[in-house]
Image (spheres, rainbow, N blue to C red):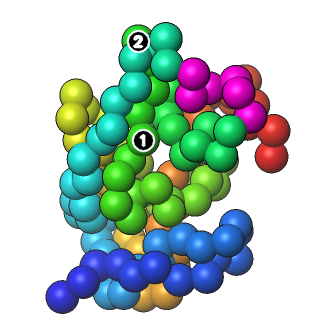
Protein backbone atom coordinates (compact mmCIF):
# COMPACT_ATOMS: atom_id res chain seq x y z
CA UNK A 1 0.00 0.00 0.00
CA UNK A 2 1.20 3.51 -0.82
CA UNK A 3 2.12 5.52 2.28
CA UNK A 4 1.50 8.94 0.72
CA UNK A 5 0.04 10.67 -2.31
CA UNK A 6 0.54 14.00 -4.03
CA UNK A 7 -2.31 16.41 -3.26
CA UNK A 8 -3.18 20.08 -3.03
CA UNK A 9 -1.60 21.58 0.09
CA UNK A 10 -3.16 23.95 2.58
CA UNK A 11 0.39 25.21 3.22
CA UNK A 12 1.73 25.84 -0.28
CA UNK A 13 0.80 24.61 -3.74
CA UNK A 14 1.10 20.84 -3.74
CA UNK A 15 2.44 18.53 -1.06
CA UNK A 16 2.51 14.96 0.16
CA UNK A 17 -0.45 13.68 2.15
CA UNK A 18 -0.62 10.46 4.17
CA UNK A 19 -2.61 7.80 2.30
CA UNK A 20 -2.58 5.52 5.35
CA UNK A 21 -1.96 5.95 9.06
CA UNK A 22 1.80 6.15 9.71
CA UNK A 23 3.29 5.24 13.09
CA UNK A 24 5.99 7.37 14.72
CA UNK A 25 9.48 6.28 13.68
CA UNK A 26 8.40 4.86 10.31
CA UNK A 27 10.71 5.32 7.33
CA UNK A 28 8.33 6.86 4.82
CA UNK A 29 10.63 7.03 1.82
CA UNK A 30 14.22 7.07 0.63
CA UNK A 31 14.80 9.26 -2.42
CA UNK A 32 17.97 9.89 -4.45
CA UNK A 33 19.75 13.23 -4.17
CA UNK A 34 21.14 15.39 -6.92
CA UNK A 35 24.18 17.01 -5.26
CA UNK A 36 25.63 20.32 -6.44
CA UNK A 37 29.13 21.52 -5.61
CA UNK A 38 29.28 24.75 -3.59
CA UNK A 39 30.59 26.55 -6.70
CA UNK A 40 27.43 25.73 -8.70
CA UNK A 41 25.14 28.78 -8.94
CA UNK A 42 22.00 27.24 -7.40
CA UNK A 43 21.77 29.47 -4.33
CA UNK A 44 21.39 33.23 -4.20
CA UNK A 45 20.48 33.59 -7.85
CA UNK A 46 16.73 33.92 -7.40
CA UNK A 47 16.17 30.91 -9.65
CA UNK A 48 13.24 28.56 -9.16
CA UNK A 49 15.50 25.65 -8.18
CA UNK A 50 16.72 27.70 -5.20
CA UNK A 51 13.37 27.01 -3.51
CA UNK A 52 13.91 23.24 -3.65
CA UNK A 53 17.55 22.70 -2.63
CA UNK A 54 18.95 21.95 0.81
CA UNK A 55 22.15 23.60 1.90
CA UNK A 56 24.98 21.18 2.77
CA UNK A 57 28.34 21.88 4.40
CA UNK A 58 30.06 21.77 1.01
CA UNK A 59 27.28 22.36 -1.50
CA UNK A 60 23.59 21.83 -2.10
CA UNK A 61 21.25 18.90 -2.67
CA UNK A 62 17.95 18.51 -4.47
CA UNK A 63 15.72 15.63 -3.36
CA UNK A 64 14.49 13.90 -6.49
CA UNK A 65 11.07 12.31 -6.95
CA UNK A 66 8.19 13.24 -4.68
CA UNK A 67 10.61 14.35 -1.95
CA UNK A 68 10.81 17.79 -3.55
CA UNK A 69 7.13 18.25 -2.64
CA UNK A 70 7.65 18.10 1.13
CA UNK A 71 6.43 21.38 2.58
CA UNK A 72 7.86 23.35 5.48
CA UNK A 73 6.39 23.62 8.96
CA UNK A 74 8.81 25.49 11.21
CA UNK A 75 8.97 24.14 14.74
CA UNK A 76 6.17 21.57 14.31
CA UNK A 77 6.96 19.19 11.43
CA UNK A 78 5.65 15.63 11.53
CA UNK A 79 8.63 14.24 9.59
CA UNK A 80 12.40 14.57 9.58
CA UNK A 81 14.69 14.30 6.60
CA UNK A 82 18.21 12.91 6.88
CA UNK A 83 20.50 13.79 3.98
CA UNK A 84 23.12 11.19 3.22
CA UNK A 85 25.79 11.25 0.53
CA UNK A 86 23.41 10.03 -2.18
CA UNK A 87 19.95 9.71 -0.59
CA UNK A 88 17.42 11.53 1.56
CA UNK A 89 15.56 9.43 4.13
CA UNK A 90 12.24 10.73 5.49
CA UNK A 91 11.02 9.40 8.84
CA UNK A 92 7.85 10.20 10.79
CA UNK A 93 8.46 12.04 14.06
CA UNK A 94 5.05 11.16 15.51
CA UNK A 95 1.92 9.27 14.52
CA UNK A 96 0.43 10.69 11.31
CA UNK A 97 -3.22 10.17 10.34
CA UNK A 98 -4.66 9.57 6.88
CA UNK A 99 -5.05 12.94 5.13
CA UNK A 100 -2.40 14.77 7.18
CA UNK A 101 0.19 16.58 5.10
CA UNK A 102 3.76 15.32 5.51
CA UNK A 103 5.96 18.25 6.56
CA UNK A 104 9.57 18.90 7.45
CA UNK A 105 11.41 21.83 9.02
CA UNK A 106 13.60 23.25 6.25
CA UNK A 107 15.73 24.96 8.90
CA UNK A 108 16.29 21.68 10.77
CA UNK A 109 15.45 23.41 14.04
CA UNK A 110 17.73 26.46 13.53
CA UNK A 111 15.55 29.40 14.73
CA UNK A 112 17.86 31.95 13.06
CA UNK A 113 17.48 30.46 9.56
CA UNK A 114 15.38 32.70 7.32
CA UNK A 115 13.82 31.55 4.06
CA UNK A 116 11.90 34.70 3.27
CA UNK A 117 8.50 33.13 3.87
Quarter of the rendering occupied by the N terminus: bottom left
Residue located at (40% from left, 82% from top): 5
Q: Between residues 33 and 97, which one lies in front from this camera angle?
A: 33
Residue highlighted by disc 1: 62
Left or right placement of residue 77 versus residue 92 in this view: right
Residue highlighted by disc 2: 58
Residue 30, labelled with which disc?
none
Q: Between residues 28 and 88, which one lies in front from this camera angle?
A: 88
Assign a secondary structure to mark 1. strand
Residue located at (74% from left, 34% from top): 46
Against 104, residue 20 (above or below) is below
Residue 84 appears in the figure: yes
Residue located at (67% from left, 71% from top): 13
Residue 26 screen position, x and y as percent: 23, 63
Left or right placement of residue 112 versus residue 50 in this view: right
Residue 82 appears in the figure: no
Give, as a single range, the part of the protein colored magenta: 41-46
Residue located at (58% from left, 43% from top): 49
Residue 8 placement: quadrant: bottom right
User: Would you call the spot at circle 1 few (<14 residues within 10 Å), some (14-19), or many (20 or more)?
Assistant: many
Residue 9 screen position, x and y as percent: 63, 76
User: Would you call the spot at circle 2 few (<14 residues within 10 Å), some (14-19), or many (20 or more)?
Assistant: few
The residues tagged by marks 1 and 2 sit, at their Cα atoms, a distance apart of 14 Å
Against 106, residue 57 (above or below) is above
Assign a secondary structure to mark 2. loop
Residue 4 screen position, x and y as percent: 35, 78
Q: Is residue 91 magenta?
A: no
Q: Main secondary structure of the magenta part?
A: loop
Against 48, residue 108 (above or below) is above
Amino acid sequence: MTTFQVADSALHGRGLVAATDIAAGTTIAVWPLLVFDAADPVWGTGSLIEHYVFELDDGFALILGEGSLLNHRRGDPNCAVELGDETATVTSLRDIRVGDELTIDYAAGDPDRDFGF
